[in-house]
Amino acid sequence: MRTIMYVRIVALLGLSLVFVAGTLALAQRMTVAQAPEPTVSETPAASAPIPQAPAPDLVVPPQPAPPPAPSLSAPPAVVAAPGAVTPPAAPSPVVTTTTPVEPAPVVTAPPAAQPAAPVVAAPTPLPPDKPPIEGAKAVAKIVFASKQLPSLGKAMAIGYYPRGCLSGGVALPVNGPTWQVMRVSRNRNWGHPNLVRFLERFAPAAAKATGWKGILVGDMAQPRGGPLPYGHTSHQIGLDVDIWFMPMPNHTLSAEEREKTSAINLVSDDWKSLNPKTWSPQQVAFIRTAAEQPEVERVLVNAAIKKEICRVAGKNGGTWLKKVRPWYWHHDHIHVRLKCPADSPNCRAQPEVPDGDGCNDKELAHWFSDKVLKPVKSTGGKPPKPITMADLPPACQTVLSAPARAKN
Ligand SMILES: [Zn+2]
């Protein structure tokens, strides 16, 4: 009997051991199965701009900005643009939330004439909401944003600052000795070679004039220029750049810092004067250095900043002072616009900056009027029609369908 009992106990123990081991193995397998994919979430979001990151141009000031009355304060390009009813600084905050356009399947765009052919009864009707992605009716901001690389070919600025594109664009390296590029994920550090050369020369000059370590470069243009899905109405032909009112820090910024850091706002809450907490005299040196460069056509700043610069410069402003133009927004960055390059016959120049230094009270008063600072909100109305390929110079279709050049 004892032996039998003994054998039974041993057998039971054995069985229990097997069961426990089995359970452990199963549990282990389940844990492995549930373990998260290691890489996915850590992959830096290379293509998607972080929507929450406040874009320098998108920080919404209380001025939805009606198109200014044609006045001596000489608004830049945008006003003169054909059909440009909208104010230049992308007034609608709605754009902020616009998901950065997911590039539609690469558009091998046929020549513009093709889509005009009479439609043969299509067996599968296209979903009605989607805008066309090729041909003359394609929404330009969508097709241009889908191009990750510049077009192969000679560098040329084509069209007008708020209505054109860029052939053979080159990239500004994201790090230089005296500059760093912000919002790298937007892929907007492209321009005509003149713009890249300008920045490479301006960055050390500005550093010297201000005592800053260097400058922070915001948006330039998309690889092939063209309208942008959010943030600007100009910046289309590779000759515009935003540069922050802020010294470059001592360290190389991380990818995240470049997305999330905001530029400093130099203007007071009522938009009538400067913010003494953020304004510094170095800003004058910074703006002046930009405006003194011969290839610079205009430097746009907020009116409160222009007013202060007029005060500091007095009567001896020289030619640089008239290039500094008051404009909506531009409280946290300057917008530098270059002249049309000699190699770009299809680049349309802006009207010359009017005579005078732009400092007289009458010119400036407009910018501080209720009309500008407290415009009556328009109720309803259709949103402006987006720019289509047909609205751009025909050469832009060629730029769009050209083969890509590898990164420089
Ligand atoms: Zn700008």
Image (cartoon, rainbow, N blue to C red):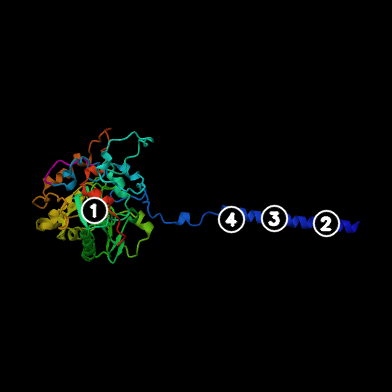
Look at discs 2 and 4 and give the one toward the viewer.
Answer: 4
Which residue appears farthest toward the front when viewing the image?
120
Which residue does the numbered mark 1 point to in the structure image?
166
- Lower position in the chain sequence, tag 2 or tag 3: 2
Residue 1 placement: quadrant: bottom right
Look at discs 3 and 1 and give the one toward the viewer.
Answer: 1
Give the camera-side residue of 175 and 178.
175
Which residue does the numbered mark 4 point to in the structure image?
32
- The amino acid on which the numbered mark 3 sits, given as a three-letter code, is Gly
Inter-mark Cα distance, 4 to 3 = 16 Å
Is 253 placed left or right of 84 in the picture?
right
Is 208 placed left or right of 130 in the picture?
left
Inter-mark Cα distance, 2 to 4 = 35 Å
Is 248 placed left or right of 12 in the picture?
left
Give the camera-side residue of 161 and 394.
394
- Type of secondary structure dominating the magenta stretch: loop
Q: Percent position (x, y) of residue 223?
A: 28, 54
**Range of magenta residues:** 65-72
- One can see residue 187 in this view: yes
Look at discs 1 and 4 and give the one toward the viewer.
Answer: 1
- Lower position in the chain sequence, tag 1 or tag 4: 4
- The amino acid on which the numbered mark 2 sits, given as a three-letter code, is Ile
Q: Judging from the image, what secondary structure is the residue with disc 2 in?
A: helix
Q: Quadrant of the C terminus?
A: bottom left
Within the magenta stretch, is there residue 70? yes
Q: Vertical placement of 314 versus 209: above or below? A: above
Res 22 label: 3
For the residue carrying disc 2, how many other residues have a C-alpha within 10 Å: few (<14), some (14-19), or many (20+)?
Answer: few
- One can see residue 330 in this view: no
Q: Vertical placement of 48 versus 366: above or below? A: below
